[in-house]
Amino acid sequence: MSSFLRPLAYRYRWIYDTVTAVSSLSVGGVDRLRSLGLEALQAHLQPGSAVLDLCCGSGEAAAPWLAAGFAVTGLDLSPRALELAATRHPMLEQVEGLAENPPLPAGSFSAIQLSVALHEFPRTEREMVLSSALKLLQPGGWLVLVDLHPAGPWLRLPQQIFCELFETDTATAMLEDDLPSQLERLGFTFVKQELLAGKALQRITAMRPIQTEQS
Ligand SMILES: C[S@@+](CC[C@H](N)C(=O)[O-])C[C@H]1O[C@@H](n2cnc3c(N)ncnc32)[C@H](O)[C@@H]1O
């Protein structure tokens, strides 16, 4: 099943921005939502290091990283979103491509952010995206992932309505799955999950091991 509202939200940015503003109230607003990745990882990183915002959209969640002085690359498949990112965040280096097979060199980032994007991938592609992220990180580099999580009682109904209107089967599948276990199975270490917004959101941080078979 696919939502007809999601393509409309990507086409008409005011719909996307309004939906984001309303759904981010549970974490304290849009600015907080956009800063969740930076907030989790800044202490692990050298100032100015290379960060990839995978599935960056129009670059709103890359903006706090840029403001903090990191060298941020944003990858997205949508030329329309990247055009908007170029206008809104000119310091963002842009790459058009697929997160499942990113056209970027292995081991080139100290951190990778996946902000509210992983739920758009079917299970097989989700596995490919996370495996790609592991390869793109330097040994000892960090992934931060912010996305939906099955809500607690207070937000269960609003989350169901949101998913009915804007999401597809891929989001439902992700809500059924245990992302921390998936990351550990793929080879990440120090996997830590935090539940936010009445459990409706999860923030997961995970590290690429310093010694791996790939390094
Ligand atoms: C919900 S938006 C999130 C955008 C941004 N990360 C944020 O937090 O505002 C999901 C983004 O994922 C992108 N996307 C979806 N599938 C993709 C793929 N296979 N490769 C790269 N980007 C993809 C979409 O174009 C969209 O910009």
Image (cartoon, rainbow, N blue to C red):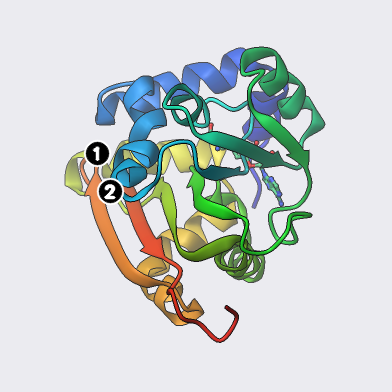
Q: Residue at x 58, y 57 (%)?
A: 170
The numbered dot on residue 181 is none
Q: Is residue 71 above or below residue 203?
A: above
Q: Could you tell me residue 132's position as x and y percent?
A: 64, 65
Q: Quadrant of ligand 1?
A: top right
Q: Which residue is mark 2?
A: 151
Front in this rendered view, residue 54 or 181: 54
Q: Mark 1 or mark 2, which has the lower sequence index?
A: 2
Q: Could you tell me residue 201's position as x and y percent?
A: 33, 45
Q: Residue at x 73, y 34 (%)?
A: 94
Under circle 1, the secondary element is loop
Q: Are marks 1 and 2 in contact (CB under 8 Å)?
A: yes
Q: For the image shown, how many numbered marks are present on the structure?
A: 2
Q: Residue at x 50, y 53 (%)?
A: 110
Looking at the rendered image, the disc whose residue lies closer to the viewer, 1 or 2, is 1
The answer to which quarter of the image holds residue 30 is top left
In this rendering, would 177 be left or right of 131? left
Q: Could you tell me residue 153's position as x and y percent?
A: 18, 47
Under circle 2, the secondary element is loop
The quadrant of the rendering that contains the C terminus is bottom right
Amino acid type, mark 1: Ala
The answer to which quarter of the image holds residue 166 is top right
Q: Is residue 201 above or below residue 70?
A: below
Q: Which residue is mark 1?
A: 197
Is the residue indicated by label 2 positioned so its CB lies within 8 Å of ligand 1?
Answer: no
Q: Could you tell me residue 80's position as x and y percent?
A: 78, 26
Q: Residue at x 49, y 57 (%)?
A: 172
Front in this rendered view, residue 90 or 14: 90
Q: Is residue 213 above or below residue 188?
A: below
